[in-house]
Image (cartoon, rainbow, N blue to C red):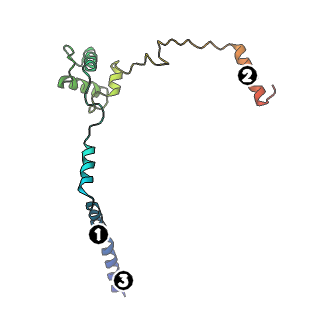
Amino acid sequence: MLSFRASLAFVLSAALAALPAYAANAHRLSASSHSHKTHKKAVKQSHRLHGQQSIEPARVTEIQQALIREHYLSGEPTGAWDSTTEAAMQKYQADQGWQTKLMPDSRALKKLGLGPDYSGAINGKETSFNEPPPLTSAATSTQAAGFAAASGINR
């Protein structure tokens, strides 16, 4: 009886071990049955470039001026994103403890004083909107009385 159990256990364990191999072959067969055109089309679309591909010369000049001011770059700004400018930006970002793979990092631009310009925004500092009037004690007591009346609490 012991040998029958041992042989049964061996057959079951062999079947369980072989099951993933059969499943992998079945997956390959179904995946390879797709047409070649569909695969080529999907590959072609995945090679499209996304995001910003280059920096405008005026922006490069601003970045170079800021790097010169911070003593990471020497000379005059050229407006060309060359290897010297890229190395200076990498050094600046590394000194701040930031990544050096993306050029330039948004945190680095902000720290260099080149962040976004919100002066034209509704809530910008130089807007034409007037400041709200200061709260007076009469207004707050009137509001408190109104809140108390609305809630039904008697004071």
Viewer-proximal residue among 2 and 66:
66
Dot 3: element: helix
The residue sitting at 70% across, 18% down in the picture is 140
Viewer-proximal residue among 16 and 41:
41
**Residue 32: quadrant of the picture:** bottom left
The residue sitting at 76% across, 22% down in the picture is 145
Q: Position of residue 55 (x, y in %)?
A: 26, 25
Which residue, given by chain and number where applicable, does mark 3 sit on? 5
* Quadrant containing the C terminus in the rendered view: top right
Query: Amino acid type of disc 3?
Result: Arg
Q: Position of residue 153 (x, y in %)?
A: 79, 29
Which residue, given by chain and number where applicable, does mark 2 sit on? 144
Query: Amino acid type of disc 2?
Result: Ala
Q: Position of residue 120 (x, y in %)?
A: 44, 16
Dot 1: element: helix
Q: Residues within 10 Å of mark 1 (few under 14, many from 20)?
A: few
**Disc nearer the start of the sequence (3/1):** 3
Q: Where is residue 37 in the image (x, y as percent from the top left)?
A: 24, 53
| Left or right side of 7 for 139 | right
Which residue, given by chain and number where applicable, does mark 1 sit on? 22
Mark 3–mark 1 Cα distance, whole angstroms, equals 26 Å
